[in-house]
Image (cartoon, rainbow, N blue to C red):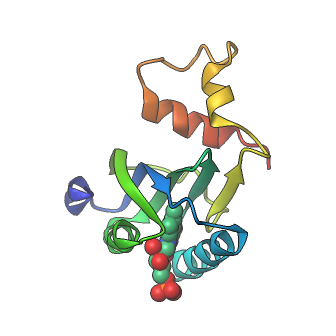
Amino acid sequence: MINRLEAVEGLGFFLYRSAAQPWLDGSDMQDILEAARRRNQALGLTGCLHHEDGMFFQWLEGPAPALVQVGNLILRDRRHQEITFLDQGALEHRLFQDWRMRFSDRRGASLMDWFAGSDNSTVDRGDYAGGVVSFMMSLSA
Ligand SMILES: Cc1cc2nc3c(=O)[nH]c(=O)nc-3n(C[C@H](O)[C@H](O)[C@H](O)COP(=O)(O)O)c2cc1C
């Protein structure tokens, strides 16, 4: 749940993983991104969505009340399920300042390959959420 954000003043973030519905196609993905970018623009939210092997990973950042509002929409969205929050809290600086919702999928970069790679030794293997964020930040422009 997104309960810890209620107490955050200023910028906050959350990171979750979910299972995409197996029937989602390219046009569903377009719909999700269009609606996400429209509302994120209006509410001052930015972030990154990665889709791979039927899973979504999403980082969303911005004013805490807007985050809670959109978080509740996302939680109710039937296009995915098994939503698990990996991390949430206060944030000093945005990580995706220029992205209303950055999107990537495994055609561009694979999170699983990235986790398996030997060149990511700076990331603590126990810090799963930190690894997902580092992967998102490593995506080339
Ligand atoms: C994986 C996933 C990520 C989403 N990300 C966002 C988001 O970042 N911002 C947002 O407003 N809606 C996002 N949505 C869509 C919301 O759940 C909701 O459907 C949408 O905001 C409704 O917009 P509308 O009322 O303009 O149709 C996402 C949905 C899914 C399935």
Residue 51 in view: yes
Expressed as whole percent of the image width and height from the top left, the position of residue 54 reads 57, 50
Name above or below for residue 118 compared with residue 18: above
Name above or below for residue 29 compared with residue 119: below
Expressed as whole percent of the image width and height from the top left, the position of residue 79 reads 48, 68
The N terminus sits in image quarter:
bottom left
Residue at the image position 58 percent from the left and 34 percent from the top: 134
Residue at the image position 20 percent from the left and 57 percent from the top: 3
Nearest to the observer: residue 110 or residue 97? 110
Residue 45 in view: no
* Quadrant of the image occupied by residue 115: top right
Name above or below for residue 79 compared with residue 13: below
Residue at the image position 57 percent from the left and 78 percent from the top: 41
Is 82 left, or right, of 43 in this rendering? left
Is 83 left, or right, of 42 in this rendering? left
Is 138 left, or right, of 68 in this rendering? right
Expressed as whole percent of the image width and height from the top left, the position of residue 33 reads 63, 72
Residue at the image position 79 percent from the left and 45 percent from the top: 108
Count of marks, rendered view: 0
Nearest to the observer: residue 119 or residue 107? 107
Expressed as whole percent of the image width and height from the top left, the position of residue 23 reads 58, 65
